[in-house]
Amino acid sequence: MWLECKHDDQSTIVAHRDHQLQQHKKPCIFPLDSTITLLKSMELCGASALAWRTSISPSLHSSPQPTSVSEFRRVRVWCVKTDVNDSSQSVKGNQMTVSITGATGFIGSKLVQRLYEDNHSICVLTRSRSKAQSIFPVKDFPGIVIAEEPQWKDCIQKSTGVVNLAGLPISTRWSSEIKKEIKQSRIGVTSKVVDSINSSTSDARPKVLVSATAVGYYGTSETQVFDEQSPSGNDYLSEVCREWEGKALAVDKDVRLALIRIGVVLGKDGGALAKMVPIFMMFAGGPLGSGKQWFSWIHIDDLVNLLCEALSNPSYKGVINGTAPNPVRLAEMCQHLGSVMGRPSWLPVPDLALKAVLGEGAIVVLEGQRVLPVRAKELGFSYKYPYIKEALKAILAQKVVV
Ligand SMILES: NC(=O)c1ccc[n+]([C@@H]2O[C@H](COP(=O)([O-])OP(=O)(O)OC[C@H]3O[C@@H](n4cnc5c(N)ncnc54)[C@H](OP(=O)(O)O)[C@@H]3O)[C@@H](O)[C@H]2O)c1
């Protein structure tokens, strides 16, 4: 049996079956046994694909043959826009195989979703298969490979790119043991990734390593402006970042390295904002501390885009600040947060309240730094959310994903 789908715009479906690329001019025809994958992939393709769903012939709604997991894995479908004047259709961008440490975290899970939607192959490098399986269930993410530490090397060596995000969260109480673990978790995982890359044969190794670090590298200041050329600070977090970056810099020189110094990532389901919002609800929502501290933030969608760009664009190398182009003082951020949440912003939120939920990790919010993304701008990176008000509005308008 065959499924026929009609297009209502310039989109085209490209089917990849058993590793043989077939490109279809409209209308396209698929065997019914791949319709579940097809439907799923069309959903992942976004609005235009959803529009197609309504125009799919009724035969689609008949019960499909049971489709095995291996079938899901063998069939891939891309939805691509084609130039109306260009009769030769091409898949947008090259398909990559990406191994990701920290993939189960706040940033990593969004990155996985994005790469998955773009039909890249993904290997989740985790310490816990069961945790990763609960975050990326096979019914929603068929084909994703989940690897525990003994299999990391194998995955890395089969990848075209690696993203390194792992590390113990810093929003905790900093006992001397925890401080050791905050540093060790980052340099340990980074060393492991770099050793795996360096020990592979030069023709089979990943072409790019995108490794996370943080704006904490610069130390804190109410007056200085930092860009990628600025020297490192002299506090605990700058020391962590220097050593973390140092391990990534040991990757062989034929592997392109992008070090992303990430600012405070704003998103609904995690990071500092998710912890700050309830405090704002409890207090009226005024400034934190003096309010003069700088807050170098980035919307999670922009960070994910930046990481994807760093994976695929050969111009992205060296240190790149992962921050929005318009950092704000904390008072301004609190004012916008208050107004977006409909809370008055005249009562200061006590530092103590924030420290209660963020631990000493509150330092990233209470003692900030003004960091400018000079490299990203030079590279022409386009921000969806350059201003904090729109970023907060967009985030707080989202439903929480549970
Ligand atoms: N979120 C921010 O605002 C922000 C700002 C600047 C920099 N960063 C950096 O960006 C990276 C990702 O941030 P995130 O917010 O997504 O972090 P996250 O949600 O805390 O996730 C980090 C991931 O690292 C792994 N991990 C946790 N503890 C570990 C340990 N002791 N040893 C090895 N791996 C461990 C976990 O993966 P498994 O359990 O699957 O192994 C976890 O899912 C972090 O390194 C963070 O420092 C984040």
Image (tube, rainbow, N blue to C red):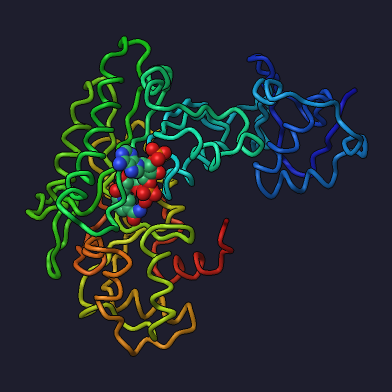
Q: Residue at the left extreme? A: 234
**Residue 309 visible at all:** no
Q: Residue at x 32, y 30 (%)?
A: 209
* For residue 264, above or below residue 101: below
Q: Nearer the viewer, residue 377 or 152?
A: 152
* For residue 217, above or below residue 400: above
Q: Nearer the viewer, residue 105 or 115?
A: 105
* For residue 370, above or below residue 29: below
Q: Residue at x 19, y 63 (%)?
A: 369
Quarter location, residue 185:
top left
- In which quadrant will I find the C terminus? bottom right
Residue 394: % across, % down: 51, 66
Horizontal arrangement in the rendering, residue 25 relative to residue 62 (left or right): left
Quarter location, residue 157:
top left
Horizontal arrangement in the rendering, residue 391 relative to residue 87 (left or right): left
Q: Nearer the viewer, residue 381 or 199?
A: 199
Residue 298: % across, % down: 36, 58
Residue 108: % across, % down: 43, 43
- In which quadrant will I find the N terminus? top right
Residue 141: % across, % down: 60, 36
Q: Nearer the viewer, residue 287 or 137?
A: 137
Horizontal arrangement in the rendering, residue 249 relative to residue 112 (left or right): left
**Residue 132 visible at all:** yes
Number of numbered labels in the structure image: 0
